[in-house]
Structure formats: C-alpha cells, structure tokens
Amino acid sequence: MFNEKQLLEELKFKAIRSSGSGGQHVNKVSSKVEITFNLYESLVFNESQTEILKTKLQNRLTKNGLLVVFCDESRSQHKNKEIATKRLLELLKSALIIRKKRVPTKISKSAIQKRLKCKKIRSLKKVNRRKPKLD
C-alpha cells in the first residue's frame, strides 16, 4: 500500500487546549492533538493513489489539500496523539481500498417458474374464498 514510516515523518502535530470537563486542569494543559497532512505535497503516494484519495476524501480535505484529524478523547496528550495517528492511518487505508464492481446476476428460469406457480396457487386460493355468483 504505502510506507507508514515515511508518512509519519510528513505529519505535523499540534497540541491545543482541549474543551470540555476537566476543571482547572483543562486551562493549564494542551491535551488536544491536531494532525495535519498535506496530500498534494506528499511523497508517500504515487499519482494514482493521490487521485483516489482526492476523490474519496474530498469532503475532508481543505482547499489547500490538507487532511486534518483531531483527538481530545483522553486527558493525556500522548494517548490522543496515538489515537489520532491510528485514525488517520485507518482513514487513508480504507480510502485506498478499491471495491469490486458488482456483477448483476440473472434470475434462473426455474426460480421464475416457481414464483409464477406460487402466485397462481395464491390467486386460486383467494378466488375460492369469494362468494359464488348465482346467475
């Protein structure tokens, strides 16, 4: 797929003050982690992979081609950094997976005949429930 070590070297990490509960601790410590990855300037992916990532991640990319991932789940900056890198790697790996094209199958003749036979039986059952016409 791609070289993860080289990708990790291209990432830019930034620690930010996290929002939410934590009391006085939240005002002193920057535990939220922001990872930015420039897809357009990356040397990790070849041209075809870059095009696939552009199309599949177009709603997550900025105008400059930056992919931004945040994590503020833990109170520890190191854990948040690990979680965010895992998230980014999973996002890139899942985007690079090429799905198989679905080949529509044809319904067999026996299945069609069986369906029509069941419809006919059901139809006769309902016709026989009706009151007889006395003409």
Image (cartoon, rainbow, N blue to C red):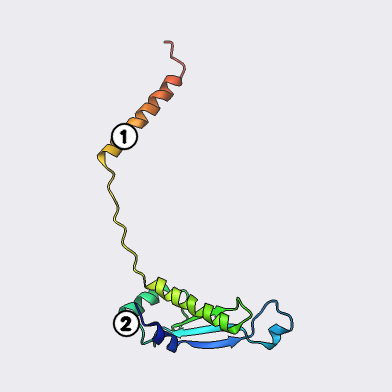
x and y percentages locating residue 17 in the rendered image: 64, 85
Q: Is residue 58 visible?
A: no
x and y percentages locating residue 74 in the rendered image: 61, 77
Residue type at the position of mark 2: Asn
Q: How far apart are marks 2 and 1 (CA)?
A: 52 Å
x and y percentages locating residue 69 in the rendered image: 52, 79
- Residue at numbered disc 1: 114
Residue at the far top in the pictured view: 135
Residue type at the position of mark 1: Lys
Please tell me which residue lies in front, 29 or 39: 29
User: Residue at 47% of width from left, 16% of height from top?
Assistant: 131
Residue at the far left in the pictured view: 109
Relative side of 46 to 88, left or right: left
Reply above or below: 15 against 86: below
Q: In which quarter of the image is the N terminus?
A: bottom left
Q: Can residue 121 be seen in this view?
A: yes
SS at mark 2 in the image? loop
User: Residue at 41% of width from left, 71% of height from top?
Assistant: 94
Relative side of 93 to 112, left or right: right
Residue 18 lies in what quarter of the image? bottom right
Residue 118 lies in what quarter of the image? top left
SS at mark 1 in the image? helix
Q: In which quarter of the image is the C terminus?
A: top left
Few, some or many residues within 10 Å of mark 1 (<14, 14–19, 20+): few
x and y percentages locating residue 16 in the rendered image: 61, 86
Relative side of 110 to 27, left or right: left
Few, some or many residues within 10 Å of mark 2 (<14, 14–19, 20+): few
Please tell me which residue lies in front, 67 or 91: 91
User: Residue at 43% of width from left, 14% of height from top?
Assistant: 133
- Residue at numbered disc 2: 46
Reply above or below: 94 against 126: below
Whichever of callouts 2 and 1 sits on the residue coming sooner in the sequence is 2
